Image (cartoon, rainbow, N blue to C red):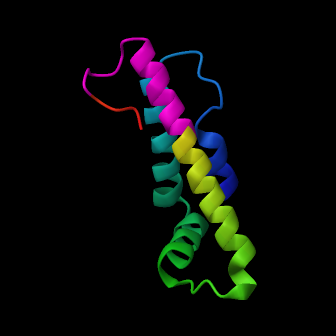
Amino acid sequence: MIDRTDASVPEVDLGDSLHSIQSSIKKILDLVENDEVAQSTFEIVALKCEYVAEFSSLDARVNNTGCDFIKRLTRSYENAESRGLLRSGLDPS
Protein backbone atom coordinates (compact mmCIF):
# COMPACT_ATOMS: atom_id res chain seq x y z
CA MET A 1 0.00 0.00 0.00
CA ILE A 2 2.85 2.38 0.84
CA ASP A 3 4.57 1.60 -2.45
CA ARG A 4 1.37 2.24 -4.40
CA THR A 5 0.80 5.55 -2.61
CA ASP A 6 4.39 6.58 -3.16
CA ALA A 7 4.14 5.89 -6.88
CA SER A 8 0.71 7.44 -7.37
CA VAL A 9 1.82 11.04 -7.98
CA PRO A 10 4.47 11.23 -10.69
CA GLU A 11 7.79 12.84 -9.79
CA VAL A 12 7.69 14.92 -12.97
CA ASP A 13 4.38 16.01 -14.41
CA LEU A 14 4.48 16.74 -18.12
CA GLY A 15 0.73 17.00 -18.70
CA ASP A 16 -2.32 18.37 -16.94
CA SER A 17 -1.27 18.58 -13.29
CA LEU A 18 -4.80 18.74 -11.96
CA HIS A 19 -5.77 15.61 -13.90
CA SER A 20 -2.67 13.84 -12.54
CA ILE A 21 -3.60 14.79 -8.98
CA GLN A 22 -7.19 13.65 -9.47
CA SER A 23 -6.05 10.36 -10.98
CA SER A 24 -3.55 9.76 -8.17
CA ILE A 25 -6.05 10.43 -5.39
CA LYS A 26 -8.61 8.23 -7.14
CA LYS A 27 -6.11 5.35 -7.35
CA ILE A 28 -5.46 5.56 -3.61
CA LEU A 29 -9.15 5.76 -2.73
CA ASP A 30 -9.98 2.90 -5.11
CA LEU A 31 -7.29 0.80 -3.46
CA VAL A 32 -8.68 1.42 0.02
CA GLU A 33 -12.26 0.93 -1.16
CA ASN A 34 -11.79 -2.24 -3.22
CA ASP A 35 -8.84 -4.13 -1.73
CA GLU A 36 -9.66 -5.89 1.54
CA VAL A 37 -6.01 -6.28 2.49
CA ALA A 38 -5.40 -2.56 1.87
CA GLN A 39 -8.50 -1.72 3.93
CA SER A 40 -7.35 -3.82 6.85
CA THR A 41 -3.80 -2.54 6.62
CA PHE A 42 -4.91 1.09 6.48
CA GLU A 43 -7.28 0.62 9.42
CA ILE A 44 -4.63 -1.07 11.55
CA VAL A 45 -1.85 1.38 10.72
CA ALA A 46 -4.03 4.48 11.00
CA LEU A 47 -6.29 3.59 13.89
CA LYS A 48 -5.16 0.57 15.86
CA CYS A 49 -1.40 0.52 15.88
CA GLU A 50 0.53 1.71 18.90
CA TYR A 51 3.88 2.86 17.58
CA VAL A 52 6.25 1.34 20.10
CA ALA A 53 9.93 0.71 19.42
CA GLU A 54 9.40 -2.44 17.38
CA PHE A 55 7.22 -0.48 14.91
CA SER A 56 9.58 2.47 14.56
CA SER A 57 10.72 1.47 11.07
CA LEU A 58 7.10 1.15 9.87
CA ASP A 59 6.21 4.46 11.48
CA ALA A 60 9.15 6.15 9.76
CA ARG A 61 8.25 4.61 6.41
CA VAL A 62 4.61 5.70 6.68
CA ASN A 63 5.61 9.23 7.70
CA ASN A 64 8.24 9.52 4.97
CA THR A 65 5.81 8.32 2.33
CA GLY A 66 3.19 10.79 3.54
CA CYS A 67 5.68 13.66 3.47
CA ASP A 68 6.92 12.69 0.01
CA PHE A 69 3.33 12.42 -1.22
CA ILE A 70 2.54 15.93 0.04
CA LYS A 71 5.71 17.31 -1.60
CA ARG A 72 4.73 15.75 -4.93
CA LEU A 73 1.19 17.09 -4.63
CA THR A 74 2.55 20.55 -3.88
CA ARG A 75 4.86 20.40 -6.93
CA SER A 76 1.92 19.30 -9.08
CA TYR A 77 -0.21 22.18 -7.79
CA GLU A 78 2.69 24.58 -8.40
CA ASN A 79 2.94 23.22 -11.95
CA ALA A 80 -0.81 23.73 -12.41
CA GLU A 81 -0.47 27.28 -11.11
CA SER A 82 2.39 28.07 -13.52
CA ARG A 83 0.25 26.81 -16.41
CA GLY A 84 -2.74 28.90 -15.35
CA LEU A 85 -4.78 25.84 -14.35
CA LEU A 86 -5.12 26.76 -10.67
CA ARG A 87 -7.73 29.26 -9.56
CA SER A 88 -6.06 32.55 -8.63
CA GLY A 89 -5.55 33.24 -4.95
CA LEU A 90 -4.89 29.60 -4.05
CA ASP A 91 -1.62 28.64 -2.40
CA PRO A 92 -0.28 25.44 -4.03
CA SER A 93 0.94 24.15 -0.67
Q: How many marks?
A: 0
Residue at the image point whose x is 65% and y is 47% from the top? 6
Q: Is residue 69 magenta?
A: no
Residue at the image point whose x is 46% and y is 51% from the top? 29
Using the rendered view, name the quadrant where residue 82 is placed. Answer: top left
Q: Is residue 72 above or below residue 32?
A: above
First to last magenta residue range: 72-89
Residue at the image point whose x is 43% and y is 11% from the top? 83
Does residue 6 appear in the picture of this structure?
Answer: yes
Q: Position of residue 46 (x, y in %)?
A: 50, 73
**Looking at the image, which is closer to me, 28 or 84?**
84
Residue at the image point whose x is 62% and y is 32% from the top? 10
Most frequent secondary structure within the magenta stretch: helix
Identify the image quadrant of the C terminus: top left
Q: Is residue 60 above or below residue 47?
A: above
Q: Position of residue 63 (x, y in %)?
A: 60, 62
Does residue 1 appear in the picture of this structure?
Answer: no
